[in-house]
Image (spheres, rainbow, N blue to C red):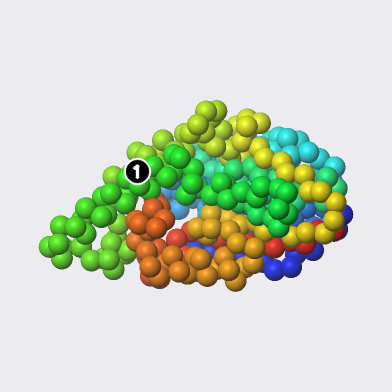
């Protein structure tokens, strides 16, 4: 099998690319998107290796995937990446406390002719005999969806007061619901790699259960696979279509409380509501 990236995009929600935590790897053996996450441990401006904690986690993931043996399975890849992050975290501490970071990834293995998903990164393909999935996005994870719904309840209640105390623009710039949903976000973070209906996969140095790893074997013949991170509300089979869905959402629901309840709004001075990356890959 041969891999070719037809089109791709990597964007940071705050603008400067070096601040983003979503990365693209394109090598002879794997094409992958890596999405870094940080769980609120960056107080005090801690910058491991001179970068934001979530990006630090993503760069560890990219290096680990680049070093992965071509014939490795997803299980072997996940264990290798977990060990790599554990090793890196030993040298990245904040006041003696280990950074609470992790990353998810979706990849295409050239040697194995497989699509992999570990954690909240989505994949979509054009074969009617296979079931592509959007289920990896954080917005669809039950624990984070609950936090998004709780935030939507608070914001809609404030808007419904009708006193004019809160406008859409004010709520985009300063979201009072953040303090209210903070315990829910802590609970969401604690569910990473737990089993059961609320658990989800994440490379964070802890064992990742098999139930959170998805492998999709591609049948013979040419086809295209799209990968996207959670900065998109939906994954489509082209970058333009995926971007249109995002821009339509930001235009019609900038507070992210109706069409796509999320844990924060889209700020007018930001590129989106989260970092985002997309890749469309052709395989033979």
At x 61% / y 49%, what residue is drawn?
Answer: 133
Q: Is residue 211 visible?
A: yes
128, above or below 90, in the image: below
Q: Helix, strand, or loop for circle 1? A: helix
Please determine whether, in this image, residue 194 is positioned above or below residue 174.
above
Note whether residue 41 is visible. Answer: no
Locate residue 246 relative to residue 31 in the image: left or right.
Answer: left
x and y, in percent, of residue 145 in the image: 42, 45
**In front here: 10 or 7?**
7
How far across and down, in percent of the image, does residue 150 sit? 32, 45
Front residue of this view, candidates 222 and 143: 222
Q: Taking 252 as reference, is 246 left or right?
A: right
> In the orientation shown, which residue stands out farthest toward the front?
128
Residue 200 on image: x %, y %: 54, 37
- Residue occupying the far left of the picture: 163
Q: Is residue 63 left or right of residue 113?
A: left
Mark 1 closeness class: few <14, some 14–19, many ≥20 residues within 10 Å: some
Q: Which residue is identified by label 1?
A: 182
Quarter assignment of residue 228:
bottom right
On the picture, is 54 further left or further right than 209? left
Quadrant containing the C terminus is bottom right
Q: Residue at x 39, y 53 (%)?
A: 261
Q: How many numbered marks, from 0 up? A: 1
Q: Residue furthest top?
A: 195
Counting from the top left corner in percent of width and height, residue 125 is at 69, 55
Residue drawn where x is 50% and y is 58% of the image:
233
**Quadrant of the image occupied by residue 3:** bottom right
| Residue name at image x 47 percent, y 65 percent | 272
87 up-or-down from 221: above or below: above
Which image quarter is the N terminus in?
bottom right
């Amino acid at each position: 099998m041969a891999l070719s990236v037809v089109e791709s995009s990597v964007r940071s929600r705050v603008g400067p690319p070096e601040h983003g935590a979503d990365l693209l790897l394109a090598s002879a053996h794997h094409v992958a998107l890596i999405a870094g996450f940080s769980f609120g441990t960056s107080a005090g401006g801690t910058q491991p290796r001179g970068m934001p904690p979530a990006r630090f986690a993503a760069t560890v993931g990219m290096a680990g995937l680049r070093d992965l043996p071509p014939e490795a399975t997803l299980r072997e890849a996940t264990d290798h990446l977990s060990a790599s992050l554990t090793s890196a975290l030993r040298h990245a501490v904040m006041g003696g406390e280990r950074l609470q970071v992790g990353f998810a990834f979706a990849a295409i293995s050239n040697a194995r002719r497989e699509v992999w998903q570990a954690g909240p990164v989505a994949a979509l393909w054009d074969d009617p005999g296979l079931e592509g999935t959007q289920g990896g996005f954080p917005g669809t994870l039950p624990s984070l969806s609950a936090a998004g719904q709780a935030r939507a309840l608070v914001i809609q209640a404030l808007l419904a007061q009708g006193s004019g105390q809160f406008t859409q623009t004010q709520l985009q710039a300063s979201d009072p619901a953040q303090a209210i949903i903070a315990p829910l976000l802590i609970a969401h973070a604690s569910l990473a790699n737990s089993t059961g209906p609320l658990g989800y996969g994440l490379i964070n140095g802890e064992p990742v259960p098999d139930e959170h790893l998805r492998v999709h074997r591609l049948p013979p013949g040419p086809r295209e696979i799209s990968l996207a991170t959670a900065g998109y509300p939906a994954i489509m089979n082209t970058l333009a279509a995926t971007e249109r869905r995002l821009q339509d959402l930001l235009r019609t629901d900038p507070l992210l409380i109706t069409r796509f309840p999320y844990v924060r709004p889209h700020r007018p001075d930001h590129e989106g509501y989260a970092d985002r990356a997309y890749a469309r890959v052709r395989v033979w």
